[in-house]
Image (tube, rainbow, N blue to C red):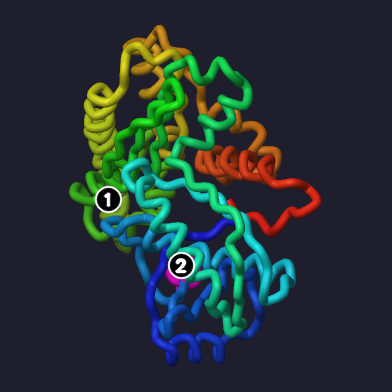
């Protein structure tokens, strides 16, 4: 089950109008609304496409994550017809810069799950196990499972490149250190938007990602806004040039930051995240040249497992790279729980 990231507060009257105007029921994960602490929220697809909400990249991830967890566990309860009371084991990755707030996050989650309303149904969920890792921790946990004792003697760097942040986490002799910078894919899109006019960020993201390194005007016809055919042709050329220049500038920013935080004596470097997939060629060239003594691993070799497990197809570019870290965390959580007392699981 996949959900969009948008969370927005709405009024009760807006929820009532939405419910009264529905003709058919959709998938639970796409029609999420909540009542929590006497306030109403829409989450995911409903928030973005019906209530015109947006992702706030400036707020802390874990604050919005409380509402996202409520939406996810409510949707799972609805899809699986769970009772209004059930037990939950939860795995959540956070950017390294917010990972220190994991205990605060756990406390807020426990309180929120114990009393909330999902689409008019009351739930009292007991959080019995909580696993929070820094982003990139799922990859590291899977490598530790493979290497066993050898993992603790190695210096392993895990790079996670997402939409908002880039994190680098170092695992060495049982210790964890890391860095997080707001230098994710949204930075690249802002560079494009500065050079173009009127572009919607989500449509631009899809077009930019699909174009990859082979940037031609024809790949941006679908997002051109001009109604005149001549102007439309000129606009697509302008967008293509903006994307080409933005990609070069964005990689320079990423490259310089990585040079500051990466360590030359690392024995293994793991790279993951959708933005890493977008910059795969640049990263491969950079890491194999400047860190040639480090073993390079893409997503801890979990890409193929995720593609098969989630039946991903060619239209879902980069999706496997976006899911591998969460998949690694969830696998680790599952192994900590005995099969005889397996509660609902959310990763």
The image shows residue 67 at horizontal and vertical percentages of 46, 67
For the N terminus, the image quarter is: bottom right
Q: What residue sits right under mark 2 in the picture? A: 67
Secondary element type, mark 1? helix
Residue at which label 1 appears = 235
206 left or right, relative to 314: left
Cβ atoms under marks 1 and 2 closer than 8 Å: no
Residue at the right extreme of this rendering? 340
| Residue drawn at 39 percent across, 37 percent down | 161
Q: Residue at x 31, y 48 (%)?
A: 186
> Which percent across, then down, holds residue 129?
59, 54
In the rendered image, residue 9, in percent from the top left (x then y), is placed at 38, 77
Q: Residues within 10 Å of mark 2 (few under 14, many from 20)?
A: many
How many other residues sit within 10 Å of disc 1, few (<14), some (14-19) or many (≥20)? many
> Which span is picked out in magenta?
43-49
30 relative to 267, above or below = below
Front residue (pair 280, 332): 332
- Examine the rendering and report whether any part of residue 158 can be seen: yes
Provide the major secondary structure of the magenta segment.
helix
Question: In front: mark 1 or mark 2?
Answer: 2
Residue 319 visible at all: no
Q: Is residue 312 left or right of residue 244?
A: right
- Foreground of the two, 254 or 193: 254
Instruction: State how far apart marks 1 and 2 are (Cα).
Output: 39 Å
Relative to 33, does residue 151 appear above or below in the rendering?
above
Residue 280 placement: quadrant: top left
Query: Does the magenta portion include 227?
Result: no
Furthest residue in direction top, as rendered: 293
Mark toward the start of the polypeptide (1 vs 2):
2
Percent across and percent down for residue 29 are 59, 66
């Amino acid at each position: 089950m996949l959900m969009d990231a948008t969370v927005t507060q709405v009024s009760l009257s807006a929820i009532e109008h939405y419910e009264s105007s529905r003709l058919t029921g959709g998938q639970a994960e796409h029609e999420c609304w909540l009542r929590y602490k006497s306030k109403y929220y829409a989450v995911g697809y409903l928030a973005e496409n019906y209530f015109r909400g947006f992702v706030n990249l400036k707020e802390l991830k874990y604050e919005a994550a409380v509402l996202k967890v409520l939406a996810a566990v409510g949707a799972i309860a609805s899809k699986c017809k769970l009772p209004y009371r059930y037990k939950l084991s939860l795995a959540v990755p956070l950017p390294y810069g917010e990972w220190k707030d994991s205990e605060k996050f756990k406390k807020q989650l426990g309180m929120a799950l114990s009393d909330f309303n999902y689409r008019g149904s009351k739930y009292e969920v007991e959080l019995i196990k909580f696993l929070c890792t820094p982003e990139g921790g799922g990859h590291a946990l899977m490598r530790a499972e493979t290497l066993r004792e050898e993992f603790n003697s190695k210096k392993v760097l895990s790079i996670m490149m997402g939409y908002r942040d880039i994190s680098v986490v170092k695992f060495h002799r049982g210790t964890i250190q890391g860095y997080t910078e707001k230098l994710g894919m949204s930075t690249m899109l802002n560079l494009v938007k500065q050079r173009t006019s009127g572009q919607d960020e989500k449509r631009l993201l899809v077009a930019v990602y699909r174009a990859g390194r082979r940037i031609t005007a024809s790949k941006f016809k679908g997002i051109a806004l001009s109604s005149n055919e001549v102007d439309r042709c000129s606009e697509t050329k302008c967008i293509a040039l903006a994307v080409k220049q933005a990609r070069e500038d964005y990689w320079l920013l990423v490259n310089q930051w990585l040079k500051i935080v990466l360590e030359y004596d690392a024995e293994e470097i793991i790279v993951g995240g959708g933005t890493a997939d977008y910059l795969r060629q640049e990263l491969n060239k950079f890491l194999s040249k400047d860190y040639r003594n480090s073993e390079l691993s893409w997503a801890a070799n979990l890409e193929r497992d995720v593609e098969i497990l989630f039946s991903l197809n060619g239209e879902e570019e980069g999706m496997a790279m976006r899911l591998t870290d969460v998949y690694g965390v969830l696998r680790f959580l599952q192994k900590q729980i005995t099969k005889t007392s397996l509660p609902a699981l959310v990763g």
